[in-house]
Image (cartoon, rainbow, N blue to C red):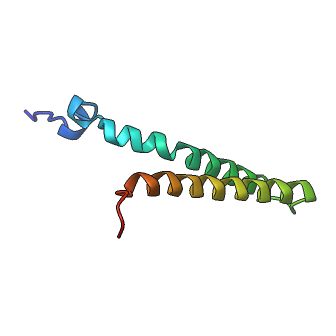
Amino acid sequence: MNHIVTVQDAVTAFADFMEPTNAELNAIEQEMPVILADVDLLDAHIVTLDRTPTEVDERRIRRARRRALAARVALVNRTGTANLSGGAA
């Protein structure tokens, strides 16, 4: 008789100790504008994969690229000011 054994990782994949911590959730929340801007940029690129980009497509890509860059700059500025100690170097 062969015994069937379950895979431990599959059984405990959603155990309480494997949930994201509050710090990880806060980090995701801080990065969410960057993530959403990158998704918009990818969407703009995906539209043009199977055809020649029109002027409207090119504008959409440029706008999405600027939004993604602005979101990254805003994230760096937020995290950069949070990491400063406030004292002279």
Q: Residue furthest left?
A: 1
Within the image, what quadrant is residue 52 found in? bottom right
Q: Nearer the viewer, residue 55 or 74?
A: 74
| Residue 54 falls left or right of residue 28 | right
Q: How far across and how far down the image is residue 44, in percent?
A: 75, 52
Q: Nearer the viewer, residue 49 or 26?
A: 26
Q: How far across and how far down the image is residue 33, in percent?
A: 58, 44
Counting labels gives 0
Q: Residue at x 36, y 66 (%)?
A: 88
| Residue 10 falls left or right of residue 8 | right
Q: How far across and how far down the image is residue 59, in percent?
A: 85, 57
- Above or below residue 54? Residue 23 is above
Q: Residue at x 37, y 57 (%)?
A: 86
Q: How far across and how far down the image is residue 84, in percent?
A: 39, 58
Image quarter (top left, top right, bottom left or bottom right) of the N terminus: top left
Q: Residue furthest right?
A: 55
